[in-house]
């Protein structure tokens, strides 16, 4: 989890590349803009979200992701 806290921002570009590779195998289209747009939207939906929440201690950054059961707190 410590590594995920440091590099969670890398998931978005990695998801775009993975979806581009999958999209190339499933659909044969020459329109790069359409492929990139669809893959970017899918990556945005599945990427982790960062929120700032207010607690008694002060403001804390929180990472929520679809595939995690509990949010990750960043100090």
Image (cartoon, helix red, strand yellow):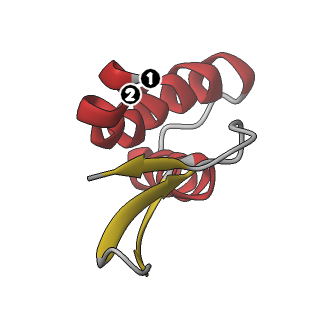
Image spot of residue 31 (x, y percent): 47, 47
Q: Secondary structure at mark 1?
A: loop
Image spot of residue 14 (x, y percent): 39, 28
What is the C-alpha distance between the residues marked 2 and 1? 5 Å
**Tag nearer the camera, 2 or 1:** 1
Determine crowd level at label 2: few under 14, some 14-19, many 20+ residues with C-alpha closer than 10 A: few
Could you tell me which residue is drawn at 70 percent across and 30 percent down?
A: 27
Determine crowd level at label 1: few under 14, some 14-19, many 20+ residues with C-alpha closer than 10 A: few
The dot on residue 57 is none
Q: Is residue 6 left or right of residue 63?
A: left
Instruction: Residue at the far front: name it.
Output: 56
For disc 2, the marked residue is 4
Are the two marked residues, 2 and 1, in contact with CB atoms closer than 8 angstroms?
Answer: yes
The residue lying toward the viewer, choosing from 18 and 23, is 18
Could you tell me which residue is drawn at 34 percent across and 63 percent down?
A: 61
The dot on residue 1 is 1
| 27 over 53 or under it: above or below | above
The residue lying toward the viewer, choosing from 40 and 72, is 72
Image spot of residue 69 (x, y percent): 75, 40
Quadrant where the N terminus lies?
A: top left
Could you tell me which residue is drawn at 40 percent across and 42 percent down?
A: 12
Could you tell me which residue is drawn at 33 percent across and 74 percent down?
A: 57
The residue lying toward the viewer, choosing from 45 and 25, is 45
Q: Quadrant of residue 51?
A: bottom left
Image spot of residue 38 (x, y percent): 57, 53
| 48 over 21 or under it: above or below | below
């Amino acid at each position: 989890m410590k590594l995920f806290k440091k590099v969670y921002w890398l998931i978005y570009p990695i998801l775009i590349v993975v979806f581009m590779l999958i999209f190339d195998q499933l659909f044969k289209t020459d329109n790069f803009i359409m492929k990139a747009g669809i893959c970017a939207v899918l990556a945005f939906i599945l990427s982790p979200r960062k929120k700032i929440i207010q607690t008694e201690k002060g403001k804390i950054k929180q990472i929520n992701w679809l595939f995690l059961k509990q949010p990750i707190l960043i100090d």
